Amino acid sequence: MSRTKLVAGNWKMNLTAAEAGAAVGTLLGQISPRPDIDVLVCPPFLSLSTVRGVLRNTALHLGAQDVFWKESGAFTGKVSPGMLVEAGCSHCLVGHSETRGRFGKLEVGESTLGYFNETDHTANLKIRALLYHAIVPILCVGETEDERTASKTESVIRKQLTGALEGIDPAELYSFVVAYEPVWAIGTGKTCDAVEAGRVCAEIRAMLGDILDKDVADHIRILYGGSVKSSNAQEIFSQPEVDGGLVGGASLDPLEFAKIVLSA
Ligand code: PGA
């Protein structure tokens, strides 16, 4: 079946609100709306309002990088799904390897990794809360380099998918998105070979068929993420089971990100 491609920019902890607004303005000048490609930007929470103002009445979608699953309460530093709805978010990342404390290239001390501490269980709670608020979750899964070397890629991803989707009615997941992000390829410049990325994405679809059901699995968009840039995007996006990309570093430059979008 044909699925609309999705190209998402994950800006992580980059760009101030003013810079983010300017970047989206430049991006909008580079891409014209296309029915066959959805484009999404995920700025830091504090930039959502500025970016929303710039992309209002355009086809560009706005997403958040994380959420907490409770509606409100004594959860210092957290943001609820209802707050994301009010901020204009249609999508939200869940379970990114950086929120799981699994970094491709470690820039923080090992001792601080516990602060991130996303688990498959918290990913599950976040997905449920987002679905309740009609925000599309983008669940990130993927193996570390050691896990790949030990031939554990499939078992790691199956565990991540099973835990994150446990107890969720498959009928709620037709618009769900999965991003295959091998941890060793994130921010490292080491891209997964396009054919291998396509193979793992096909495996993920087969796993979703087992865990959920085949029809739902056929509708779920599966993105590749990890050092996507304009020079490799076309080859990656042309793999039959890759429905687009989750782009980190290269999405910070609106001209480069526009080229990646056009490769889809
Ligand atoms: P990268 O990050 O494109 O900078 O490798 C991708 C991601 O972490 O989503």
Image (cartoon, rainbow, N blue to C red):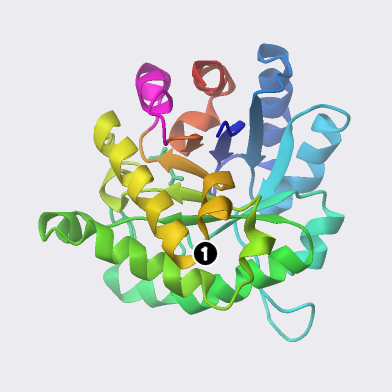
Left/right placement of residue 36 relative to residue 140 reads right
Please report the residue visible at 46 percent of the width from the left and 66 percent of the height from the top.
Answer: 211
Which residue sits at x=57%, y=31%? 2
Is residue 97 visible in the rendered structure shown here? no
**Residue at 58% from the left image edge and 54% from the top image edge:** 216
* Residue 149 falls in image quadrant: bottom left
Residue 53 position within the rendered picture, expressed as x and y whole percent measured from the top left: 85, 36
The stretch drawn in magenta includes residue 17? no
The type of residue carrying mark 1 is Leu
Q: Is residue 79 above or below residue 47?
A: below
Q: Indicate left or right for 208 with 55 as reference.
A: left
Q: Is residue 82 visible?
A: yes
Residue 134 in which image quadrant:
bottom right
Segment colored magenta? 228-241
SS for dot 1: loop
In the rendered image, the residue lying farthest to the left is 150
Q: Nearer the viewer, residue 228 or 104?
A: 228
**Image location of residue 210, percent across then percent down:** 42, 63
The residue furthest bottom is: 74
State yes or no: residue 239 in magenta. Answer: yes
| Image position of 208 (left or right of 17) | left
Disc 1 target residue: 212
